[in-house]
Amino acid sequence: MRQHRSMPLIRIVYWGILLVILLWILFWDYNSYLSRYQKARKLQRMKSELVEMVARNDSLRNEILELQSNPEAAEKVGRERYGLIKPNEKIFRFVPAPESPKDK
């Protein structure tokens, strides 16, 4: 009779240990499903950032080549970005008027 009562207890312990091992593998282990999922998402984000950076790098490389080979492009960048002017040249800058309360 004693052996009959201990069988359900052994089953409960067995399934409990099995459940703990399964949960450990799925969620808490270094190489768990959860950590693999997080690492895969991070890898995907890093790949998309890499694509963006490569495209930006290519555009900057093209801009550098254009500035080195075309003096008119260098002059245009100097005028637009840095406000450079030629000697005896006048520049007019138009500042937009502030919005009045009636326009809103």
Image (cartoon, rainbow, N blue to C red):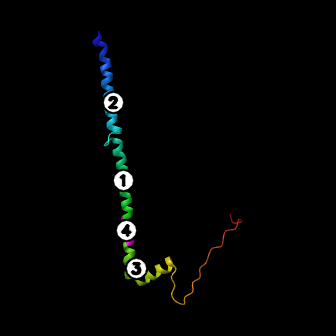
Identified by mark 1, the residue type is Gln
Q: Nearer the N terminus, badge 2 or badge 3?
A: 2
Across and down, in percent, residue 34 comes to 36, 42
Quarter of the rendering containing residue 31: top left
At label 3, counting other C-alpha atoms closer than 10 Å, the crowd grade (few under 14, some 14-19, many 20 or more) is some
Residue matched to label 1: 44
Evaluate if marks 3 and 1 touch, with contact meaning CB atoms under 8 Å apart. no
Across and down, in percent, residue 16 comes to 33, 26
Q: Nearer the N terminus, badge 3 or badge 1?
A: 1
Residue matched to label 3: 67
Across and down, in percent, residue 17 comes to 31, 28
Q: Nearer the N terminus, badge 2 or badge 4?
A: 2
Evaluate if marks 2 and 1 touch, with contact meaning CB atoms under 8 Å apart. no
Across and down, in percent, residue 103 comes to 69, 66
Q: Nearer the N terminus, badge 3 or badge 4?
A: 4
**In the image, which disc is placed on residue 57?**
4
Question: Vertically, is 27 above or below 74?
Answer: above
Q: Nearer the N terminus, badge 4 or badge 1?
A: 1
Identified by mark 3, the residue type is Leu
- Residue 17 counted in the magenta span: no
Residue matched to label 2: 19
Q: Nearer the N terminus, badge 2 or badge 1?
A: 2
For the magenta stretch, what is the residue range?
A: 54-60
Pick the residue in front: 98 or 14.
14
Identified by mark 4, the residue type is Asn
- Residue 35 lies left or right of residue 75; in this view the side is left
Query: How far, Cα to Cα, is label 2 from label 3?
Result: 66 Å
Identified by mark 2, the residue type is Leu
